[in-house]
Amino acid sequence: MTEPKIRLLELADAQDFRDIRLSALKESPEMFGSTYACEEKLSIEVFEARLRDAMVFGAYIDKEIVGLSVLKQDGGPKDAHKAYLSGVFVAPEQRGHGIAEKLLLAVKRYANEHMEQIMLTVVDGNKAAISLYEKHGFKIYGVEPRALKEGTEYRDEILMALILR
């Protein structure tokens, strides 16, 4: 396998961002708070705005985006020390090659310079993600019951934090 390149996405990458986000919502709908049907209608300008509002890391193999993670820092005077990690996804055909870990390491390197802690939620039952986060120092601090609802089905979310300093 070609070694993935992890980099911050820029405005010029908005179409890649849209493509991988829609792929994530299609391939793993139970893991996200939004839906493919909702986001496929969004304009490219919406994805550009998201790129301006957060640090979006993309994993590329042979110039094709195959993974994603989004880090959004709070902006208030009392909460700017925190950021939220979300939207983590690796294309199914690329899983098992350490791409999610490489994305997480890029997020941690960035966060170490710009903030003091990273918060995240992960759908209860996503053992691979929970294990990866715990391996990198994230600690579970709670559970949000019934955090996501689709039809009549509910999913709890595990709340995790990594204190950097």
Image: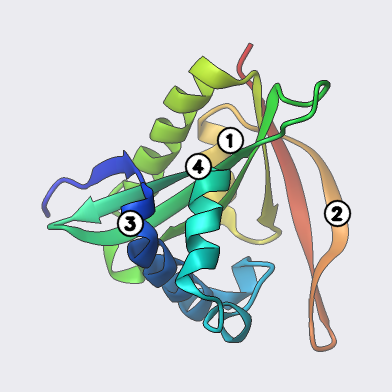
Number of numbered tags placed on the structure image: 4
> In this rendering, would 31 be left or right of 19?
right
Q: What element carries label 2?
A: strand
In this rendering, which labeled residue sits more in front, label 1 or label 2?
2
* Depicted 98 relative to depicted 20: above or below: above
Cα–Cα gap, marks 1 and 3: 30 Å
Kindly indicate whether the residue at mark 3 contacts the one at mark 1 (C-beta within 8 angstroms): no
Q: Mark 3 points at which residue?
A: 13
Element on which disc 3 rests? helix
Q: Mark 4 points at which residue?
A: 132
- Depth order, front residue of 6/152: 6
Q: How crowded is mark 1: few (under 14 residues within 10 Å), some or many (20 or more)?
A: some
Q: Residue at x 58, y 55 (%)?
A: 127
| Amino acid under disc 1 | Glu
For residue 131, say whether it is visible. Answer: no
Q: Position of residue 36 (x, y in %)?
A: 56, 81
